[in-house]
Amino acid sequence: MISITKDITNFLKKKFVMNLATCVENKPAVVPVVYVMDEVYNFYFITYRNSLKSKNLMENPQCSFVIWEFLKMSVQASGVASVVEDEAKKEWFVKEYSDKSTNDPNFWDPMFRMKIEEYVIFVIRPTWMRVLDLSHSTVRQEKSPFTEIRIPIKESGLES
Amino acid sequence: MSDNNLKSILILLNDVDLVLLNVMKTKFKKENGWESHIATSYNDAVKAFEAFEHIDGVLTEIIINDASGRTGFDFIEEIQSTKKGADAKVVVFTDLGLEEDKERAKALGVDHYFIKSRITLNELSQELKKIIQ
């Protein structure tokens, strides 16, 4: 059984890639991005200002994402994205991002393979979040296997 | 700037991408245990070099930011004229792939010459580990 406060937090801190979905003019787009989560469950990522996801979020900040691992859990969320302008927060993000994106020595962010452009850092504040425990193999169980997380998430931990 | 047990390297690149440079620095620290200092101009590199008590390796680009037009070759010559620099491994990591550049590096006693477009950062990290440790 997943512990809401501990297991999900540890899972989200350990994982570093989310699949992020944006949508403009009824055209959805999904991309993997390296994310960093802060203590109050805001999710940050970096991209080029002219990337499709960046342009989409500038036009429509509503987005969804999933962070999952086979046989562990799937965290699904929707939220609102905005550009991070605070310099101290940007500096914090770059440090955390550098740490996370180098945890696996075989990982290399595809962003660096592209020609350098102006960066932009986004923060996603979740408005809805649920967790699916993937450690069980039940069939048609009576109770929903999803656990919905109340938003806003308190600083002291996730609340179910 | 360094203790005796920790490898110290100086990286001189003309890259203004501070995100990429931060990732490089973190990667070298985690994978190779190096304390690296990154300089993005000739003068900064000289200042950083002087601040090191001991330096194990220098990774430098050839085309670097310098108002006087000095290059990575000039930097290598400058540090090699010192005892501290003469003891350090010197590696070129550059966009330039001409034979004459490689020959010049060889004549200066450079330990290895890597062309950026032909090596991944993962490979660079592993190769540097072999050269410097």
Image (cartoon, coloured by chain):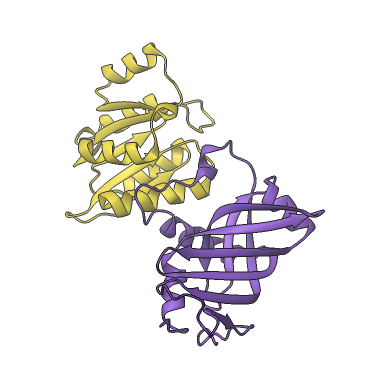
Q: Identify the residue shown where x is 80% and y is 55%.
A: A26
Identify the colour of chain B in the image. Answer: yellow
Left or right: residue A73 versus residue A119 is: left
Badge count:
0
Question: Which image quadrant for residue B103?
Answer: top left
Q: Is residue B123 left or right of residue A134?
A: left
Whether residue A148 is situated above or below residue B15 in the rendered picture: below
Q: Above or below — where is B99 with respect to B5?
A: above
Please tell me in which quadrant of the rendered image residue A155 appears. Answer: bottom right
Residue at the right extreme? A25
Residue for point 45% across, 56% down? A98
Image x and y of residue B91, in percent:
30, 31
Residue at the farthest front position: A140
Is A155 rendered above or below residue B79? below
Q: Quadrant of residue A99?
A: bottom left
Percent position of residue A7, x then y: 41, 78
Q: Position of residue B27 (x, y in %)?
A: 36, 50
**Residue furthest out toward the top:** B100
Residue B98 in the image, given as x and y percentages of width and height:
41, 14
Taking the image as drawn, is residue B75 in sight? Answer: no
Relative depth, front residue between B17 and A156: A156
Q: Nearer the viewer, residue B5 or B67?
A: B5
Q: Residue at the spot x=37%, y=12% of the render? A: B99
Question: Where, quadrant-wise, is the C terminus of chain A in this rendering?
Answer: bottom right
- The hue used for chain A is purple
Judge by depth and name the residue closer to the eye, B68 or A20: A20
The quarter of the picture where the N terminus of chain A appears is: bottom left
